[in-house]
Image (tube, rainbow, N blue to C red):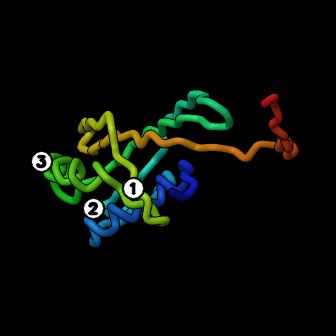
Amino acid sequence: MSAISTNIVLDGITLALRAAFPNSQIESNRIEQGLTPPAFIVLLVSEEQTARNGHRWHRRPRFDISYFPKERREECYDVANKLYRVLELVTLPSGDLVRGVNISFEVTDNVLHFFVSYPHYVSAESDEEPMEEMNFAQGGLI
């Protein structure tokens, strides 16, 4: 397994969206103007981190995949149903897989907001010096 980061998960999400929705504009930054529906914007909305043993942490990034329909609100429902399948298991650029959890959606002002988290572990190399090699000799009475 390769090292996973939030940016790599974001790349995996956008790659999955491009494959499933090739005719849609897909962005990972907020666009104030120039968005042409159908379009997606993928944003990290929050991330939690919990320390584990050693130099490991469990991270839970939560993403909002916003979809701007071309025509009608009902289009958002169709896209949401497809996103459940497309984003449940995402292949990262490294080939590793991450599973989406806590998946939900809502439609607000005719925009679909599809929420999904991708929990994963991260680790850091230790700055500590490894222990030197020790030799033991076993002896005893016969």
Q: Amino acid at mark 2?
A: Pro
For label 2, the crowd category at 10 Å Cα-Cα, with few meaning under 14, some 14 to 19 and many 20 or more, is: some
Q: Amino acid at mark 1?
A: Leu
Q: Residue at horizontal 44%, vertical 39%?
A: 119
First in sequence: mark 1 or mark 2?
2
Question: Above or below — where is 25 with respect to 97?
Answer: below
Question: Above or below — where is 82 with respect to 126?
Answer: below
Name the spot of residue 94 as percent of width and height, x first.
Answer: 49, 65
Name the spot of residue 2 as percent of width and height, x first.
Answer: 54, 58
Q: Which residue is mark 3?
A: 74
Helix, strand or loop status at disc 1: strand
For label 1, the crowd category at 10 Å Cα-Cα, with few meaning under 14, some 14 to 19 and many 20 or more, is: some
Q: Residue at horizontal 50%, vertical 34%?
A: 46
Q: Which residue is mark 2?
A: 38
Task: Give the number of the mark in front: 1 or 2.
Answer: 1
Q: Which residue is mark 1?
A: 97
Of residues 39 and 131, the one nearer the viewer is: 131
Q: Amino acid at mark 3?
A: Glu
